[in-house]
Image (tube, helix red, strand yellow):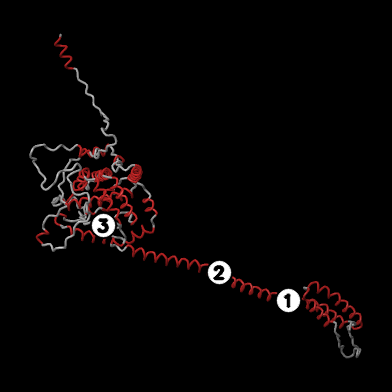
């Protein structure tokens, strides 16, 4: 029985509880700040061996500081010492070129050139020295620059102004930092303003911790490349207002000469000039204001410290990782930047932000003659405005002239119509006169004939003629117009003149019938 109980108890499965335990430990010294607690990759790095003699020893390096292997002076001179140009022999050209983070990679594209030719603009980077890379990059930018596209964005800048009003996440965080710095003198109290999401923490845990042995020149190139990459990222985030699309990876790598041409730099100003030229040559929105806005955004990110820079790099890493051909840039640059920045000195980032803020950029320094284009376009615009104003002024004059001409034509037509009317009136007058004369002559002819027939009654007929004339006058005047009364009276006087009728021989000789006007 006991055996069975033992077997039964042993067969019972044990319960395993899984969960997340959150433990809060108070600080021994309240208010003390511990930097780098959110840098998970550095915290998860295995501790070094404590043997008496290390297996790998960094030669020429001093004691390792808490923030990494860089133990140079805090005052970092951001100008690389320039050396005179020297002719390069043909044998030296066959040496493999270096690229990637800190120039630590070479020979990668010898076997992958066909697969990644669309990712980078430079051909055969393994056999192209830095000076030749720059010459080819400048030539490609000049060939790509489109004056019409630039002037279109320059004059029609409604979309550009809308983009400039967008506030990415670092704008509000920077304002909070300034508020905190105004209330407290602690420089590290603003580090907690930047937090990481669970996805970003997962990204940090996947990175493999590394230590980078970089000489002074390589350190310069790392910091300059960081500025170049951040400028491209700020532009991409602003123009798309924080949203990601299929062009996000293209925008970042195309605007960064570090990623696209494996370019190296001598100072911060060269980085700004290259970024400004590429903004005016390649993306959809090409405006100098976007260059200056990305410049100010990058300064704010650097002033926010390592956490803000790391957050941006993690976002770039995610964008490239989701873009099939662009993931190679994570292997060459971004992954190493994400690990390195966690150990970088905060004071050097502050010094880099200060140097970047002091550097200015003008349109003339871009070498694209955009100022001349703008002046020529403005002159053309002024001339067009003057022509339009002249047309607008001459338009009313032309219309007034046409109206005057039409008025003249109307007056001519009216005059002609009046002339025609007067002619018709004269014709009507003549007709009416002839009709009146005919109407008046009719009775007179009849009476005269009556006089010829009946000579014995001349006086009677003359009396009748006189009465007929007197009766005919008002009738004629009633038929004619009032203006014809003088004519009628004259006709009446003519008809009242003496009418002499000669009789043939054998008749009463010397008998004359005289009709005289009794009114005379």
Reading the chain from its start, which is encountered first: label 2 or label 1? 2
Quick one: label 2 or label 3, which is nearer the N terminus? 3
Q: Nearer the viewer, mark 3 or mark 1?
A: 3
**For discs 2 and 3, the disc positioned in front in the rendered view:** 3
Task: Give x and y (percent) for residue 71.
Answer: 18, 47
Element under disc 1: helix
Q: Say which residue label 2 marks.
A: 400
Q: From this viewpoint, is residue 141 visible?
A: yes
Task: Look at the picture and state if 469 lies above or below 289.
Answer: below
Mark 3: few/some/many CA within 10 Å (<14, 14-19, 20+): some
Residue 269 got which mark? 3
In space, the residues marked 3 and 1 are separated at their CA atoms by: 103 Å
Q: Quadrant of residue 318?
A: top left
Residue 133 placement (x, y as % from top left): 19, 58
Which one is in front, 454 or 515?
Answer: 515
Q: Is residue 429 above or below residue 7?
A: below
Q: Circle 1 sits on which residue?
A: 429
């Amino acid at each position: 029985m006991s055996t069975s109980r033992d077997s039964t108890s042993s067969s019972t499965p044990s319960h395993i509880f899984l969960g997340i335990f959150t433990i809060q430990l108070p600080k021994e010294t309240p208010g003390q700040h511990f930097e780098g607690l959110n840098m998970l990759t550095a915290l998860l790095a295995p501790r070094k061996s404590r043997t008496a003699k290390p297996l790998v020893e960094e030669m020429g390096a001093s004691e390792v500081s808490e923030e990494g292997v860089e133990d140079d002076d805090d005052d970092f001179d951001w100008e690389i010492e320039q050396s005179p140009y020297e002719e390069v022999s043909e044998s030296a050209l066959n040496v493999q070129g270096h690229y990637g983070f800190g120039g630590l990679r070479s020979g990668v594209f010898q076997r992958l050139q066909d697969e990644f030719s669309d990712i980078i603009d430079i051909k055969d980077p393994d056999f192209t020295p830095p000076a030749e890379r720059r010459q080819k990059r400048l030539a490609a930018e000049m060939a790509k620059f489109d004056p019409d596209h630039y002037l279109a964005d320059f004059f029609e800048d409604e979309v550009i102004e809308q983009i400039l009003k967008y506030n990415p996440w670092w704008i509000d965080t920077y304002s909070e930092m300034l508020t905190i710095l105004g209330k407290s003198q602690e420089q590290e109290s603003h580090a907690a303003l930047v937090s990481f999401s669970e996805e970003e923490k997962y990204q940090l845990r996947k990175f493999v911790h590394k230590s980078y042995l970089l000489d002074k020149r390589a350190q310069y190139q790392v910091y300059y490349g960081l500025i170049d990459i951040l400028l491209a990222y700020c532009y991409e985030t602003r123009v798309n207002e924080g949203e990601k699309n299929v062009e996000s990876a293209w925008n970042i790598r195309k605007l960064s000469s570090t990623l696209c041409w494996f370019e190296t730099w001598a100072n911060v100003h060269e980085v700004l000039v290259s970024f400004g030229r590429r903004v005016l040559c390649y993306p959809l929105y090409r405006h100098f204001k976007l260059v200056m806005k990305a410049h100010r955004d990058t300064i704010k990110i650097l002033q926010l410290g390592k956490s803000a820079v790391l957050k941006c790099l993690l976002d770039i890493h995610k964008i490239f990782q989701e873009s099939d051909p662009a993931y190679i840039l994570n292997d060459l640059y971004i992954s190493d930047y994400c690990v390195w920045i966690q150990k970088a000195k905060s004071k050097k980032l502050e010094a880099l932000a200060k140097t970047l803020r002091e550097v200015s950029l003008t349109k003339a320094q871009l070498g694209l003659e955009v100022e001349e284009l703008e002046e020529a376009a403005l002159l053309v615009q002024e001339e067009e405005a003057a022509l339009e104003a002249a047309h607008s002024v001459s338009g009313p004059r032309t219309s007034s002239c046409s109206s005057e001409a039409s008025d003249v034509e109307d007056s001519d037509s009216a005059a002609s119509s009046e002339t025609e009317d007067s002619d018709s009136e004269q014709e009507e007058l003549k007709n009416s006169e002839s009709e009146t004369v005919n109407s008046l002559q009719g009775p007179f002819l009849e009476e005269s004939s009556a006089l010829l027939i009946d000579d014995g009654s001349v006086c009677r007929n003359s009396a009748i003629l006189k009465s007929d004339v007197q009766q005919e006058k008002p009738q004629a005047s009633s038929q004619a117009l009032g203006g014809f009364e003088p004519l009628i009276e004259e006709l009446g006087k003519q008809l009242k003149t003496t009418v002499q009728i000669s009789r043939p021989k054998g008749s009463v000789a010397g008998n004359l019938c005289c009709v005289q006007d009794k009114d005379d």
